[in-house]
Image (cartoon, rainbow, N blue to C red):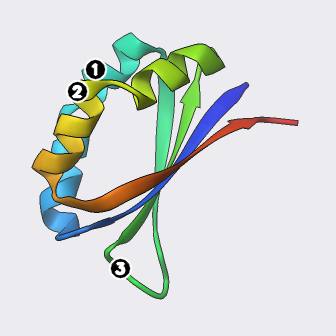
Amino acid sequence: MAHVLLQFTVESYAKWKPIFDSKEDFRTQAGCLGAQIFRSGNNPLEVFCLLEWDELENARTFAASSELKKGMEEAGVTGEPNINFLHQV
């Protein structure tokens, strides 16, 4: 199973979360099978998303997409996200 772990900081979680939720269809069509969201215990503006994917290549295509970048900007993500591609072992 392939996963992507995204780590980033947001201007406001209350602003980011509804926009993330509104993009579920886009993620699903790209091959995402589900997502778990975590917030840092040290900084509530630091968000971690663990996304499960059907194929690692689909995850890489999604991560490089202009729609993801546009959505993150719209949602108030600050700076560059840290993106890790993972294989479950």
Q: Classify 10 Å Cα crowding around label 1: few (below 14), some (14-19), many (20 and above).
A: few
Label 1 sits on a secondary structure element that is helix
Who's the residue at 18% across and 70% down the image? 11
Crowding at dot 3, Cα within 10 Å, few <14 / some 14-19 / many 20+, comes out as: few
Q: How many labels does the image show?
A: 3
Side (left or right) of 76 relative to 63: left
Residue found 57% across the figure and 24% down from its top = 53
Q: Quadrant location of the C terminus?
A: top right
For residue 28, above or below residue 67: above
How far separated are the C-alphas under marks 1 and 3? 26 Å
Asked whether the residues under the numbered discs 1 and 2 touch, taking CB atoms below 8 Å apart as contact, a structural biologist would say yes
User: In what element is the residue under mark 2?
Assistant: helix
- Type of amino acid under label 3: Pro
Residue 54, position in %: x, y? 60, 16
Q: Gap between marks 2 and 3, in whole Å?
A: 25 Å
Q: Position of residue 74 (x, y in %)?
A: 11, 47
Seen from the viewer's position, the closer of residues 9 and 18 is 9
The residue indicated by pointer 2 is: 67
For disc 3, the marked residue is 44
Q: Which residue is drawn at 46% across and 19% down?
A: 61
Mark number, residue 81 = none
Of badges 2 and 3, nearer the viewer stands 2
Q: What element carries label 3?
A: loop
Q: Nearer the viewer, residue 56 or 88?
A: 56
What residue would you read off at disc 1?
A: 26
Q: In which quarter of the image is residue 2?
A: top right
The amino acid beneath tag 1 is Phe
Mark found first going from the N terminus, 1 or 3: 1
